[in-house]
Image: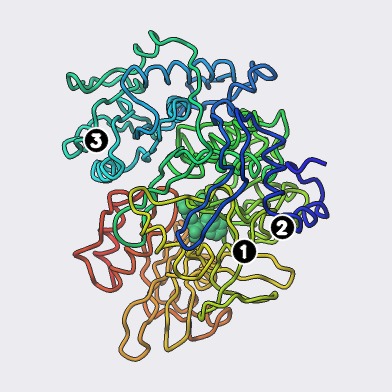
Amino acid sequence: MSNYHVKTLEEYFQLYRKSVRNPELFWEEIAEEHFVWRKKWDTVLEYDFSKPEFKWFEGAKLNITENCIDRHIHIRGDKTAILFEPNNPDEEAEHISYKELHKRVCKFANVLKEQGIKKGDRVCIYLPMIPELAISILACARIGAVHSVVFAGFSSTALATRINDCEAKMVITSDGSYRGAKTIDLKSIVDEALESCSSIETVLVAKRIHSDIELKEGRDKWLQPLLEEAYQDCVPEIMDAEDPLFILYTSGSTGSPKGMLHTTAGYMVYTAYTFKNVFNYKENDIYWCTADIGWITGHSYIVYGPLANGATTVMFEGVPSYPDFGRFWEIVEKHKITQFYTAPTAIRALAKENLDFVDSHDLSSLKVLGTVGEPINEEAWHWYNDNVGKKKNPIVDTWWQTETGGIMISPLPYLTPTKPTYATLPLPGIQLALIDENGKEIKGNQVDGRLCVKYPWPSMARSIWGNHQRYKETYFSAYDNMYFTGDGALRDEVGYYRITGRVDDVIIVSGHNLGTAPIEDSVNEHPAVAESAIVGFPHDVKGNALYGYVILKETGEERNQDNLRKEINQIITEHIGPIAKLDKIQFVEGLPKTRSGKIMRRILRKIAHNELDNLGDVSTLLNPEVVQNIIKERL
Ligand code: 7RM
């Protein structure tokens, strides 16, 4: 029996029990069977929650790119590794085979070396979704440099903060990027950022939009001519299991971004194992994750997980709305996508549009659909299931975090019966706990609490770059001997998990703990509502009262706003109770969102509190422009 691929639900439960009885044996068997090790480990796991310190596969030696590229060349060298679909549908898609990927990564790695990058140096990558992004990540990993990808929609201030925090020596960027009908001048954002970054020695600039930009003498270099000159083979740097692989910044609820540090062997084993099982990946599948590589979903499930399995992974440069709202489905049809992995926010945005955009495309190649990033509401789940999956494709609602490195809770396609809005069961190897207000574990089913993980897993972040104390305080200090996720969850009568949202999104109204997520779900059930976000604001009598920001569907007809408010509160009363009624309901055009589609309730909270002076850096938002409108029309 292969531990790597679970084939029946019974096998899932068996494997799950085994992983709890003997976690080290469980992970060892997975690591044994499927990877190229230059040297095997001495110990599978050593850990200490109080430090906290976690070491997986200590003593092992490997290079992750050998696992993601070299070993595939002999058996599937001509198979497409990366399928690049450009922003402009008239531009031809690019199929990069495993052989070619090897050559391009090696050349890039040699350029990095020539430019003075060594093992352990930090390289900041600020690129749009073009092949050079994946290739530069792998080139860093090839030579043991630590990559820190910054999403190419972030502002110069956000970029500078992230460069300075890890003291990167190099930035890799492009002359610009395409996003729908727009072009963005990335290089001038980098120039601005670098005015306040002293650690950067070199900037490599990829040509994408062929704009007329200036290179700064001695610092900036065009990438392509260097690549042409470079030698096409590069011996991989042999890394220790716990050597840093990358840093990825995630915004904390307060203060500066946290540079989550991931290391080599555990991350590789876990992303490969989860990719294979969660997407039920088979050799000739064409897998597409629509996330940007600038966030963890792209790292784990566009680059490392798929390539470690020898898969074909699609990279899409554009946006779901360009040239029209049918673009995703056009791409599914064009490349015969078998697994499609996206975010609830994208599903909701597309569900607002005419169904013809979906129905006019042949989606019969699809086998598995996935979601990630936020709780998916019932309505969006059904829209996805009915219209995209035609009720025949399982939906894997995958719960995980930048900090967890890989998927933690998810159905296994065709094995786990799905249930709308439920991420369902932990993957074998993942031991969850729900904790009550007194810090005690809640046993049994039909309960809810704070979601924790009570045993280490291979892809957990090992630290926050330069601030181990903050790592300890944020994740390991709330409860002893556990990792605290910051999310709340409930466990239903059969043991399925449903993530209810961040626990900091809980508001106490007249002494009642109210989670914003279930109230938002109720609001969203009103047929006129497209999306909503709820925050608390101070109230003389109740302590806090609820403030709802609501986006209406575009129907073209005028609606009486006061009636809508009454109807929305009526639904809340029926679903939750009058205690959860909204005191204020503001109709808005858009909600402030992160680039990965998460609503920034922190900003809405400040607006509702009338604290308008310190909204923080809104430039990292997907849509900073909505903030001013919300402020102007606040109630
Ligand atoms: C992968 C990613 C992590 C936070 C996490 C949750 C929320 C993610 C789901 C979800 C409900 C899901 N990394 N979240 N997936 N909530 N159901 N399937 O998103 O670091 O950017 O965010 O996202 O709150 O803690 S992340």
In this rendering, which labeled residue sits more in front, label 3 or label 1? Answer: 1
Mark found first going from the N terminus, 3 or 1: 3
* Cβ atoms at labels 2 and 1 below 8 Å apart: no
Q: Quadrant of the C terminus?
A: bottom left
Q: Residue furthest bottom?
A: 541
Viewer-proximal residue among 170 and 22: 22
Could you tell whether 486 is left or right of 367 in the image?
left
- Which residue is nearer to you in this view: 316 or 199? 199
Residue 189: assigned label: 3
Residue 349 shows in this picture: no
Depicted 48 relative to depicted 633: above or below: above
Question: Which residue is the site of mark 2?
Answer: 418
Q: Earlier in the sequence, mark 3 or mark 2?
A: 3
Residue 490 at x, y percent in the picture: 61, 71
* Residue 230 appears left or right of 370: left
**Residue 432 shows which numbered tag?**
1
